[in-house]
């Protein structure tokens, strides 16, 4: 179905614009993905938007044509509008942009199949959506099964997280849970919980990693609560040669994940 | 010297506010550092602000007292103002904030002593100030000598870069240069130039790294130009198990830097 919108006060415009806000995303259960590259990543991963929005005067592009076709075939809607209204929806001035509206993905723990991968990333109270998206991207690179978001993490469906993930939001498994739900789930099957720590820890190189290995990364400023570290099966340290005692959270997760990958593959 | 400012149109207020903008920073040769933690990092590294700005009603704090003392002893200025004017300067509403004004650091290549460290990070056209700051932070952690910024990188003295560096902007050496200046400088002494690459590359684990090792990371979307990769003494690949063919730039640099550290230390 095709629709053309010319009025700023059109309810669809208001709705789409509202999806830039977390509260409205949660209520609607939908999120926005902006840019042809990310939309193509989504499509290749089998995710077709419910709605596709672009400016009426957008240049033709094969990928857009194909997207339009798939959206139509799936019963979705292609919306054209003015460049000004498109800017209002995206918050940016790029009139060549394409925006997709997707249903939020199921993020229940129960959906994850821990046996499907050797590595899982776990983030606790990670507040920066860029860090969160970067962890998804790293997860894709190391062949992780997905990212488990513990406690009060940033919203993985925010524009910034989706962008930083470079499309991995569509390919990595993703779950959201409180610590009190996560631990019983983890202990209900095989799995080694590993964290970078300064307490009672062994060097991260050559540590005895076991699959499936769950790599736990804590909040950007506070790190992990002591009780969470205590729950870990393995605590490892990375060299800190300088004045600081910690790395950026997404960096720490990645250095550890590549070490685990080398250890389990080697 | 102490000064109290109550007028929004005071030239000092205008000047301080202008330092949030790159163009004005370059013209003035000064930059802002916000937050007691970063100011304390700077102080410990021997960097005392020229001016220290805070709200008149700020709560007392030992660290602030000490900072005030050092600023005074160095001939600097302590400026108190209203919470509203402070917010205007910082762009934030935190009336407990403290802001320091620093002279920009010398970023000439000639200043770097390549023999002082085994690892150097090199970023080319890195546009994201958060990535840039994160690389400085990683450099501190791996004991790197510093970060060399090639071509058109983000400004290392922006608030975002300084914040992401967690103070490493004051401890890591830093140079800015065009590629055409960097290569002759590099080849004028010992140094191995290494990049992550897909072309004619060896696995990054166990590659023959040599000190001083210069780890080159390219632009976030384009990666490195082919000619820059060709100049490298060693091209290495990291496993990419998923759909994507690259990592976040700061993550790639960190994974490689930790591998080089283990190789040279081991």
Image: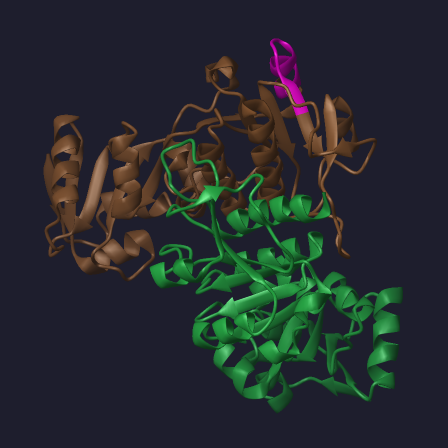
Chain colours: A green, B brown
**Residue B216 shown left or right of residue A57 in the figure:** left
The answer, for residue B201, to whether it is visible in the render is yes
- Side of B167 relative to B188 (left or right): left
Quadrant of residue B258 within the rendered picture: top right
Residue A164 on the magenta segment? no
Quadrant showing the C terminus of chain A:
top right
Placement of B83 over or under B165, stated as above or below = below
- Determine whether A166 is above or below B129 in the image: below
Q: What stretch is highlighted in magenta?
A: B182-193
Image coordinates of residue A13 in percent, x first then y, are 62, 84
Residue B169 lies in quadrant: top left
Q: Position of residue A150 (x, y in %)?
A: 48, 69
Check residue B192 for magenta coloring: yes
**Image quadrant where residue B18 sits:** top left
Q: In which quarter of the image is the N terminus of chain A?
A: bottom right
In the rendered image, residue B89, in percent from the top left (x then y), is placed at: 29, 51
Residue at the image position 38 percent from the left and 41 percent from the top: A245
Residue A216 image offset from top left, x and y in percent: 51, 58
**Total residue callouts:** 0
Residue at the image position 35 percent from the left and 56 percent from the top: A222
Residue at image position (55%, 70%) is A186
Residue A60 can be seen, yes or no: no
């Amino acid at each position: 179905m095709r629709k053309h919108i010319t009025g700023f006060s059109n309810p669809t415009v208001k709705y789409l614009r509202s999806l830039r806000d977390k509260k409205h995303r949660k209520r609607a259960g939908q999120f926005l993905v902006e840019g042809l590259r990310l939309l193509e990543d989504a499509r290749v991963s089998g995710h077709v938007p419910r709605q596709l929005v672009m400016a009426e005067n957008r240049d033709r592009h094969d990928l857009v044509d194909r997207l339009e076709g798939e959206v139509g075939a799936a019963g979705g809607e292609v919306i054209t509008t003015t460049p000004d209204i498109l800017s209002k929806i995206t918050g940016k001035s790029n009139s060549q942009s394409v925006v997709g509206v997707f249903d939020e993905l199921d993020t229940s723990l129960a959906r994850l199949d821990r046996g499907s991968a050797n590595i899982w990333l776990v983030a606790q109270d990670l507040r920066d959506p860029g860090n969160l998206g970067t962890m998804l991207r790293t997860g894709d690179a190391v062949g992780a099964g997905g990212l488990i978001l513990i406690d009060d993490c940033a919203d993985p469906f925010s524009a910034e997280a989706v962008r930083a993930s470079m499309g991995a939001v569509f390919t990595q498994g993703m779950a959201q849970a409180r610590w009190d739900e996560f631990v019983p789930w983890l202990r209900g099957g095989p799995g080694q919980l590993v964290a970078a720590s300064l307490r009672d820890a062994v060097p991260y190189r050559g540590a005895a990693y076991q699959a499936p290995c769950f790599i736990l990364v804590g909040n950007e400023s506070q790190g992990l609560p002591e009780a969470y570290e205590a729950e870990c099966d393995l605590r490892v340290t990375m060299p800190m040669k300088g004045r600081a005692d910690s790395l950026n959270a997404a960096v720490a997760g990645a250095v550890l994940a590549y070490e685990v990958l080398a250890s389990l593959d080697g």
